[in-house]
Image (spheres, rainbow, N blue to C red):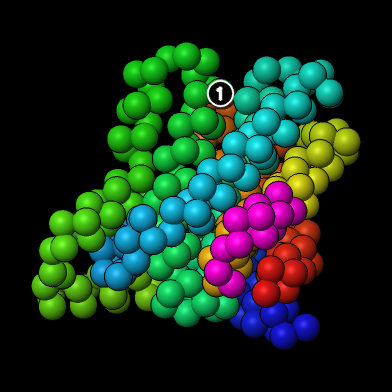
């Protein structure tokens, strides 16, 4: 119950975004602009600042990174089974495939700060820095089917990838962060999480008939049950410290990223089934996410 109460403000912000979207003056262009602001400015600032200023080195959390990569690869394999199991057309499969392993960065960082404070946020940022390139590379590769140039270009343009790699490099070089730029980054970072959660709520879309129920259930089982269960088991096998275990399970248990819808629309215009998976998964995570964090505590 304590964990669920701790997450109430985050879920209230998501609900607030869903309600605001239905009010006059908060139409689609507003949210499109806000999403771009969060994705291209605020969250890169948060990731860079967190990674550049943390005292945590990549080697200090090698086991955490190994767990993150392991459950992500396992989720990819389970997601790939959807195509032969349900005989999905390639366009639909390519769009939905990413929903089994991509994670909502907004929710990850918001909850990490809530349950782990500064150290939890640093660990989550480190995992984001490692896994964002991994999941984006795999998702884009499924759409492009071997067009390496398009994959490389997509990764080079991804602001979260660039911010994560830059922050890790800044930290590795042990460069000081000047006071004025540091303060600007701090202000931008402080706005990232609440505005990101509002954008998540505004992006919820429910279009019935866009995906068969067994397929929808499969991706929810993979993302919200199987993946966090694997993450929890791995943290116990490797005897990770309590906070690292909690952050690993959190990363595995959050719903699919809203950016999966954007990628699907850009790549093959098959966005409706992805929007349904994201929206229903976000609602289900209101129950499953507190459960998994409590299990990992």
The secondary structure that dominates the magenta segment is helix
Q: Which quadrant holds residue 188?
A: bottom left
Q: In this view, does 3 lie to the left or right of 111?
A: right
Q: Position of residue 20 (x, y in %)?
A: 60, 69
Picture residue at 33% right of the left edge, 52% below the top: 164
Q: Please name the residue that numbered disc 1 is placed on.
A: 142
- Residue count near mark 1 (Cα–Cα under 10 Å), binned few <14, some 14–19, many ≥20: some
Q: What stretch is highlighted in magenta?
A: 229-242
Does the magenta-highlighted stretch encompass residue 274?
no
Q: Farthest residue to the top: give it.
A: 146
Whether residue 36 is situated above or below residue 85 in the rendered picture: below
Quarter of the C terminus within the rendering: bottom right
The residue closer to the viewer here, 13 or 236, is: 236
Q: In this view, does 145 lie to the left or right of 170?
A: right
Q: In this view, does 222 lie to the left or right of 68?
A: right
Q: Is residue 232 left or right of residue 104?
A: right
On the question of residue 167 being in view, the answer is: yes
């Amino acid at each position: 119950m304590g964990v669920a109460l701790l997450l109430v403000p985050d879920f209230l912000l998501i609900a607030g975004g869903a309600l605001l979207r239905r009010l006059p003056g908060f139409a689609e262009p507003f949210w499109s602009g806000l999403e771009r602001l969060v994705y291209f400015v605020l969250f890169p600032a948060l990731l860079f600042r967190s990674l550049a200023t943390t005292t945590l080195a990549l080697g200090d959390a090698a086991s955490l990174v190994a767990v993150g990569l392991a459950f992500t690869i396992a989720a990819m394999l389970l997601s790939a089974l959807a195509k032969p199991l349900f005989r999905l057309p390639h366009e639909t499969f390519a769009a939905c495939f990413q929903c089994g392993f991509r994670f909502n960065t907004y929710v990850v960082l918001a909850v990490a700060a809530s349950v782990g404070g500064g150290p939890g946020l640093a660990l989550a940022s480190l995992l984001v820095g490692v896994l964002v390139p991994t999941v984006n590379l795999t998702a884009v590769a499924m759409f492009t089917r071997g067009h390496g140039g398009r994959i490389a270009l997509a990764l080079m343009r991804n602001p979260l990838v660039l911010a994560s790699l830059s922050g890790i490099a800044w930290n590795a070089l042990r460069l000081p962060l000047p006071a004025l730029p540091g303060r600007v980054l701090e202000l931008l970072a402080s706005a990232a999480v609440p505005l990101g959660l509002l954008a998540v709520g505004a992006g919820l879309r429910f279009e019935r008939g866009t995906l068969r129920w067994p397929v929808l259930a499969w991706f929810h089982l993979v993302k919200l049950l199987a993946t966090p269960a694997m993450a929890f088991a791995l943290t116990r096998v490797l005897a990770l410290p309590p906070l690292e275990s909690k952050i690993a399970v959190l990363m595995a248990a959050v719903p699919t990223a809203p950016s999966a819808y954007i990628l699907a629309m850009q790549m093959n215009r098959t966005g409706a089934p992805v929007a349904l998976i994201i929206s229903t998964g976000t609602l289900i995570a209101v129950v499953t996410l507190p459960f998994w964090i409590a299990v990992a505590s």
